[in-house]
Amino acid sequence: MACGTRSCQEPVIVSPATRVDLLRVEGVTVRFGGITALDKVTFGVPAGYIVGLIGPNGAGKTTLFNCLSRLYEPSEGDILFEGRSLKLTPAHGIAALGIGRTFQNLALFRTMTVRQNIMLGGHCRTRSGFLSNALRMPWVGREEAGLAAHTDELVRLLDLGPVAHTPVADLPFGTQKRVELGRALASQPKLLLLDEPAGGLNHEEVGALMALLRTVRDRLQLTMLLVEHHMNLVMRVSDRVVALDFGRVIADGTPAEVQANEAVVSAYLGGVS
Ligand code: ATP
């Protein structure tokens, strides 16, 4: 399936006045026995924004991502995507709803090629199953052609053309991370959850990632929520930043506001670079 209404070619400028929250986290609390990992966490992610989610180790970032992916059930509160609660959506229905995710530990098939890995990410958008494939129903060929065209667009967008037919295991780590991004984008998400995309990258690769995230957001009209320890990347790429500490939101504002926030500085014992 091609990009359809969301073209991979045209940058889109959204007026700030028209922005509404694509995602709302409302009073979410998660407890593990005696530990309160998230404590009445509330914030919004406006459509078209890149929102950075920061906090020291153990602050609750992964727990929140796992709630958004429906891997964890909040003890209290709700998460609204496009105004609808996620409570009725099981984890396996999240991608079809329009929420994609990359993982800290790459979730790739290492013996398959770059193109095959990206294409697999789009299968949640197809309706053909074992039976319709076996019977060669008319829509199966159309879906496969659309999926292939969309995969090729993503390969170009992520500058993976020269390695499109190379097995993932033969590629450097930084390139594998771009494949992981492509796999998540193949499901045509409206909201992309990025879990430490800069983890393990060298200085040059982090610089390229900053530019790539903004290009991808603009071209695909995406909204992104980014968990990242690399402060320089978060502060330069994000439109807003939410800071957590001990499961609570301690700051929510522009990168400059959050960087200057005393609670954030003291949570990081010495501030952000
Ligand atoms: P890091 O940056 O180190 O990945 P984080 O901000 O992602 O940290 P979480 O992993 O969400 O933090 O952890 C928040 C708190 O919840 C921590 O005290 C952690 O020990 C606890 N926690 C997380 N998952 C579980 C679990 N499955 N069972 C028990 N406690 C957990």
Image (tube, rainbow, N blue to C red):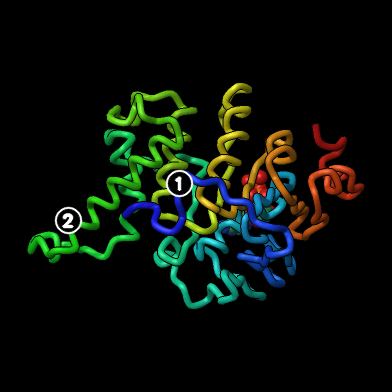
Whole-percent x, y for residue 206 in the image: 61, 29
Report helix, strand or loop for mark 1. loop
Report helix, strand or loop for mark 2. helix
Name above or below for residue 98 compared with residue 174: below
**In which quadrant of the rendered view does residue 164 lie?**
top left
Question: Which disc is residue 124 wearing?
Answer: none
Whole-percent x, y for residue 82 in the image: 57, 71
Residue, disc 1: 8
Given residues 58 and 157, the one toward you in this image is: 157
Q: Residue at x 63, y 64 (%)?
A: 32
- Left/right placement of residue 7 relative to residue 191 reads left
- The three-letter code of the residue at mark 2 reads Gly
Whether residue 33 is visible here, answered yes or no, is no
**In which quadrant of the rendered view does residue 33 lie?**
bottom right
Residue, disc 2: 141
Q: Earlier in the sequence, mark 2 or mark 1?
A: 1
Q: CA distance from mark 2 to mark 1?
A: 22 Å
Image mark count:
2
The local crowd at label 2, few if under 14, some if 14 to 19, many if 20 or more residues have their Cα within 10 Å, is few
- Left/right placement of residue 21 relative to residue 177 reads right
Q: Residue at x 45, y 29 (%)?
A: 175
Q: Residue at x 45, y 37 (%)?
A: 157
Given residues 104 and 238, the one toward you in this image is: 238
Given residues 228 and 191, the one toward you in this image is: 191
- The residue sitting at the left extreme is 135
Whole-percent x, y for residue 221 in the image: 54, 53
Name above or below for residue 256 compared with residue 244: above
The C terminus lies in which quarter of the figure?
top right
Whole-percent x, y for residue 222 in the image: 55, 53
